[in-house]
Image: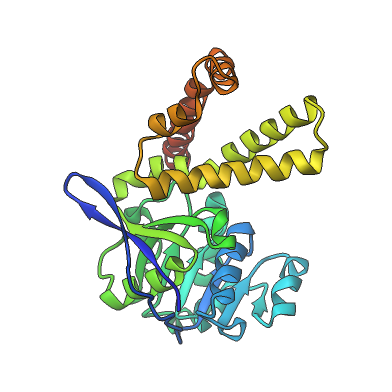
Amino acid sequence: MKFRNFFKILNNGVQLHYCTQPQPIQKITEKIGFIGDGNMAKAICFSVEKHNIIDFSQVYVSSPYRANLNIWKEKGANISIHNYEVARNADVIFLAVKPHFLKNALDGILENNNVDDIKNKLFISILAGYTLEDLEQFLKPFKESRIIRVMPNTPVLVGEGCTVYCPGKNVTQNDLSIVKTLMEVTGLCFEVEERFIDPIAAVCASGPAYTYLFIEALSDGGVRMGLHREMATMLAAQTVLGAGKMVLSTNKHMGTLKDDVCSAGGTTIAGIHALEKGGVRGSVIDAVQSATNRAAELRKAK
């Protein structure tokens, strides 16, 4: 049993709700495929399996590099260097290649003489830069297939991820149920309009990298002032984790939480002053803007 939290989309924004009763973990029977074996594919699959939603025997994964598949094989997944094998055997197929490799990956499937075997599939795209319209066009040769665009982040691996999804045409309630069952156990998961995907990706999908940079800098500061690295990193990481939980659990504005820590004339406000002089706030906003704009550039480039 697990307590799940979820978002409900309201007309005036997104409101966080918490289930008050434990929800039973629902195991799914569909075969799950990954075209692409990178870090995000591993994070999703390994987390979902850890929560007993699937077994590795249900998993099919492909990569052009056989050596990359060894870790999957050791865990009991079905592996292949041919994307067609994943597309033929799996019911739910994650498109998890780098965006610029998508066309080649799908072309490799279409070149197979038995492509008519691939129908009535649910495709889940985790690719930046490809809209639902783009993806539906790519998947036209696969009869009765549906597409859901999903944007997760790497902390799904440890059950603290943030995932949003947007369904394409002809997606069924069962398709949505599969996505929610797979992704809710990895952290927050909610549906959004497609126009929000790029800025959400800039905050959530790219955000862990910004946060790691901050944690490293906070650790560096501790080392600069005499702490051992291991202690400084542990304290910095736990501080960021705790601060995030304070934001989610107290319902207080971040400015209020900051003010609660800043005593008049004290040490914390002196540190805040230094951060503001360094332009930290503006730099983070610029990072989100740059990542969002880059997604648009990727669309144009393809």
142 versus 278 height, above or below: below
212 versus 114 height, above or below: above
Most foreground residue, 46 or 258: 258
Question: Residue 96: x percent and y percent?
Answer: 54, 61
Rendered residue at 48%/30% (across/down): 290
Most foreground residue, 137 or 186: 186
Rendered residue at 41%/37% (across/down): 296
Snapshot quadrant of residue 201: top left
What is the total number of numbered labels drawn onto the structure image? 0
Question: Residue 108: x percent and y percent?
Answer: 56, 67
Question: Residue 129: x percent and y percent?
Answer: 44, 46
Most foreground residue, 212 or 135: 212
- Horizontal side of residue 32 vs 170, given as left or right: right
Q: Can residue 137 be seen in this view?
A: no
Most foreground residue, 93 or 261: 261
Snapshot quadrant of residue 82: bottom right
Snapshot quadrant of residue 55: bottom right
Q: Can residue 150 be seen in this view?
A: yes
Question: Residue 190: x percent and y percent?
Answer: 34, 58
186 versus 234 height, above or below: below
